[in-house]
Image (cartoon, rainbow, N blue to C red):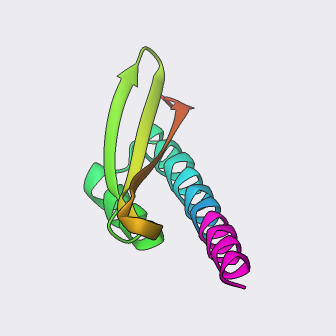
Amino acid sequence: MPAVVLVLVFCLGGLRLGAEQLRLQDAAAEAARQISRGEPLESVAERVRGLVPGAALATADRQQLVCVSVGSGNRLLAFGSVLTLAATSCALRVDP
């Protein structure tokens, strides 16, 4: 019986981490599009933190692309393991 509970805990933890990764990817894509349209970085960062509480945002310019990386804080897993989740997305810069 303890083995079944352990497997169930790991499966549920994996589902939770997968959902968190999807939220990070969506937030990075949305932030990249907003910054590429010229929206202020502060307001974009606030929206990202609204989508993923505790998220950190970093931007990089790559020629005509605006790339955004969004990372969440450390997630504690079973047995004290630490895992940091992150996602990156790029968007073509829109000239005004």
Depth check: give the residue in front, 56 or 67. Answer: 56
Q: Tell me the quarter of the picture where residue 76 sits.
A: bottom left
Q: Is residue 1 left or right of residue 38?
A: right
- In the rendered image, the quadrant that contains the N terminus is bottom right
Q: Residue at x 57, y 50 (%)?
A: 25
**Does the magenta segment cover residue 10?**
yes
Q: Tell me the quarter of the picture where residue 63 sits.
A: top left
Can the viewer see residue 96 in this picture? Answer: no
- In the rendered image, the quadrant that contains the C terminus is top left
Q: Main secondary structure of the magenta part?
A: helix
Q: Is residue 25 left or right of residue 86?
A: right
Residue 48 pos. (x, y %): 41, 62
Can the viewer see residue 25 in this picture? Answer: yes
Residue 18 pos. (x, y %): 64, 60
Depth check: give the residue in front, 56 or 21. Answer: 21
Q: Residue lying furthest top in this view?
A: 63
Q: Is residue 94 left or right of residue 22?
A: left
Q: Against 60, is 17 above or below?
A: below
Q: Against 85, is 79 above or below?
A: below
Q: Against 24, is 29 above or below?
A: above
Q: Residue lying furthest left in this view?
A: 42
Residue 51 pos. (x, y %): 47, 69
Q: Residue at x 47, y 18 (%)?
A: 64
Q: Residue lying furthest bottom in this view?
A: 1
Residue 60 pos. (x, y %): 34, 29
What's drawn in magenta, residue-wise? 1-15
